[in-house]
Each structure stands twice: as C-alpha cells, then as structure tokens.
Amino acid sequence: MSKTVTVIDTFGFFFRSFYALPQHLKNRDGFPTGLLTGFTNFISSLQKQHESDYIVFAIDTKGDSFRSQIDPNYKAHRTPPPAELLMQLPIAIEWIDKMGYKTLGQVGYEADDMIATVVRFAKANGYNVRVVSHDKDLFQLIDDGKVVLVDAIKKQTMDENACFDKYGIHPKQFIDYQAILGDSADNIPGVKGIGKVGAQKLLAEYGSLDAIYANIQSVKPAALQKKLLESKEIAYMSKELVTLRDDVLESFDFEEYKMDIENPFLNIYDELVKYEQNAILRTLQAKNVVTPEAHQESVKKVEAEVQKSKGVHFQSKLLTDAKELDAVLATLSRDSVVAFDTETTGLDYEKDRLVGFSFCFNDAEAYYVPIAHFYLGVGVQIEERAAKEAIRKIFGSLVVGHNIKFDLHFVMKFLGDADLEIFADSMILAWLINPESALSLDKLSEALLGHTMIHYKDTVKKGETFASVALEDACRYGAEDAYVTLKLYYLFLEMLELQEASHLSKRQEMWSFLLSKRFLRWNKRA
C-alpha cells in the first residue's frame, strides 16, 4: 500500500483557524486562544481521522522571497493581521516542535514553494500527498490519484473535479489562469480588463497561455486581442510570480517527518492547561493518558507561574539628588533605548507647565525626576538647570514615548531652544499593528501586558494638579508610565516582525507617518 504524506500550509491554516473560530475565545487571564484551540483540534483530528505516514509543517521564513525581486510590488500593502492573532502565532509554532513534529522553511522562498518541493519528492517516491490548505495558489499541484488539497476547516477534499467545478479550469491550467486573472490580494497584475469568465473561455479554447499568444491573431473580439497584446509582458511576469518552485531542496528525507508520535499533547500539557484547551484535556484524562493527580499538579504549577508573571515587576526610583541623577544617566549611550514621559499641570502647553519627568531603559527599574511640585512640606527636587541638562542627555539616546508629541510641546518650552530627535512612538506602533484597538497607555497595558495601571484620578485630587501630588506618589505614577511604554515598545517590535513589517519602526518612517494628514486626522478624533 502506498504511503501518504500530509503537508500543512502552516500560516495559512493558522489564519483560517483564527477567523473560523469565535474571536472572543480567551483564557481566564484574557489571553486570546482561538487560534490555539483550532490548532489543537486539528492535531487531535489528525490523530483520529487521517492515516498518514509523514507530516510536514511548511512555513514562511522572515524576509522577502525571490518573487519580490521579480516585482517589488508583490504582496505589498497587505492588511496586517490583528494583534490577537500575532500574540498566538509564536506559541503555536513552538508547539509544533515541542509536540515532536517538524517545520520546513527556506530563506527566500514561501511555504507554497516548500509544499511544491515536498510534493515533487513524494510523487517521485510513489507516495500520495494531502496538502492541508485553502490557498488557491496550491490548486496547481492537484493531481488525481496522487495529490489532493484538504480544507481542514470545512473538512472538504479538493481534487481535479472540485477544481473544475470551482474555477472552470483544470489544475494543470491553474498557473495560466492566475497569470491572466491576476490576484489583487498579492498585487499580481494579470491582464488588465480580463476577469474570471474571460480567462476561463480563453483557456477552454486555447488550453494554455503560450497557445493563446501563439494564436493571438485569431483571438476575438478585437478588444480582447488588444488587451492581451498590451499586457503580454505583464501576463508572463504574473505567470512567473504564481508558479510554485518545486526545486528548493536537492534532497528530502521523509523519515525525519514521521507522523507516528504517540501522545504529542503530553509534551505541551502544562501549556494546554495555561491556555485552557479543555476539550483536549478532557480527552487525555478520559483515555487515562494523564492521571487526575498529574493534572492537578500541572494546574498548580501553571497557576503559580501565572501569578508570578501577572502585572509588571519593577522598582520606581525617585531622583532628587543631581549627582545621583548624573550617575544614572552616565550609564546611557547613544544606542540606549530610553522611554520618556512627562507630568504637567494640565494639557495646554502654552498655559500649563512641566512638573517632572520619568524615564526607563531596562527591565528592572524606572525613574521619576521632580522639578516643580508645590505643596506644604514638599521635599528636595532637581533644580531647573540640572533638569535641563538631564533631559538633553536623555535625548542624546534613542527616545521612545507614547503620544510623545504631547511631551515634546512641554519639554521644548521648558528647554527654550531644543532641537530634539525622537526614535519611536509606541502609540503609533500600536496603531500600525491594529488601527481598531484602543491606543491609550492604560488600555494597551491591560490588554497586552495584563497590568492595570495606576489611575490619574486616584493620584490627583479633584480640583488640584499634578504639582500637588506627593513626590513618592508621583514617582510611582510617573515611573510606571515610562516602564510600561518601554515594555510595549519591545512587544510591538516583536509583533511588527511577525507581520514582516519591521521597517515601520524605523525613525524616518515613524515620523513621516506622524506628520501625515492621515494620522493627524485620526489623532484629532482621538
């Protein structure tokens, strides 16, 4: 009996799984779990319903593929995935390896190319292939009796008949079909002015793109012939973009991808508990794979870890001595990333004044520098000259803020003649990652860090300003702002990297966007 290879379009499956399940699924700590639930359900169904000898998880690698060299516009301007999906993605990828399975990717190529390459080796060995994907690009691989596509969400198998029923063409024509039609999602141009019906009719009559152009003078009507002639170069470029490469690897050892892993979920049991994958947990307990005692021990372990990781843990340090402030700032370099925040008497920089500022550049502590608190019994504060020098030193590093243009208004007024350079704004990064999310620091902290910040109304008494806040209370409040800003900044960098949009964190990109009409219109509404 011929062996079977199951190849997973990994990211494609994760995205489809995320949108197929209710997006409100979260564990008790508010962490989204829809993608993880879909993934565990899928692995469980593989074990139950599908006999397969080998399983390969094909993945995209970081960076551009060779297709971007053919056309720089390829896959440009794609809508970034939601933050809830990005938060789960690295966990799911880690689970693949932890469960004992293997991923397959190659720099410069896409997951689809890896799939096509595995298919080539499998067919050479006489193996049958099940490609788990909903991606239409993979229809070109369908070969009855050898290769089928499987929609794991709808539980449908797609063969040559299914391809013809859906698109009106045969799998061997699919590359030419896409070359004519194009694909707006991937920025593949195709032949301008020819849609699905036109592409179907052309391929039904001529069979292939080459045959169409070999007989171009016989194509009717004249308007259709003209469209084809005008777009000939683009059509063949589009064909090159949509053609999957099946020669990425020189050899492939299927024995490294054996599917016969006994109880793969045992290797991630604690994480199944943490992310409340209850259906799988119940199944494992019902089959006596895990004893009730072992389950309870896992629950206790996870709860202890969750309690330890809840919130943020840092020291807020009040700096009221100029020498101590200088000593702290002496540890900064031009390459240090420093989160910076101000506290003021109000929101109008023309009428209100700077009261103090906070900064943070590591994961252990954040500092608050008071300069203009005013109340009976107020302690020693940093004098104006030393405060100005300190701010200039901070801005000699890579400064990150949250809605930092607010802080800049007050700081530049305080310094008088400052020309300050900003490195990044975590609020803009949050917007770039998910324009629909709440962008205030406290809401982002709650949603992404699981940390409830100190409320302004609990710090400043009604009818008073921040100048009236006791120095110790001001330190806790202000230092937290800087610390959370830095934590979010690094988290957003990770999210942008997962979106393959790290270039958006570059300072010139950031500030050209900040000054754009699009952002200013949004910021005015906010």
Image (cartoon, helix red, strand yellow):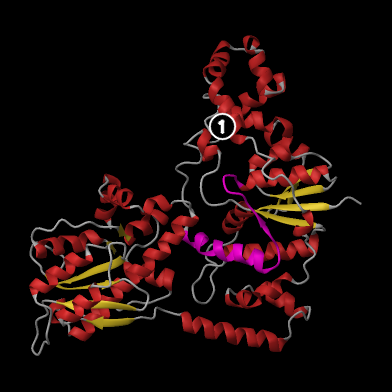
| Rendered position, 210 above or below 46 | above
The reply, left or right, for residue 372 in relation to residue 519 is: left
* Residue 10, percent from left and from top: 63, 54
The residue lying furthest to the right in this view is 1
The reply, left or right, for residue 490 in relation to residue 55 is: left
Residue at which label 1 appears: 182
Nearest the viewer among 4 and 365 is 365
Whether residue 158 is visible, yes or no, is no
| Rendered position, 454 above or below 32 | below
Q: Residue at x 57, y 30 (%)?
A: 238
Nearest the viewer among 347 and 61 is 61
Whether residue 381 is visible, yes or no, is yes
Where disc 1 sits, the SS reads loop
The reply, left or right, for residue 37 in relation to residue 192 is: right
* Residue 148, percent from left and from top: 76, 45
Report which quarter residue 260 is drawn in.
bottom right
Q: Residue at x 84, y 42 (%)?
A: 145
Q: Residue at x 37, y 54 (%)?
A: 505
- Check disc 1: other Cα within 10 Å, few if <14, some if 14-19, many if 20+: many
Nearest the viewer among 256 and 454 is 256
* Residue 332, percent from left and from top: 27, 69
Numbered range of the magenta stretch: 83-110
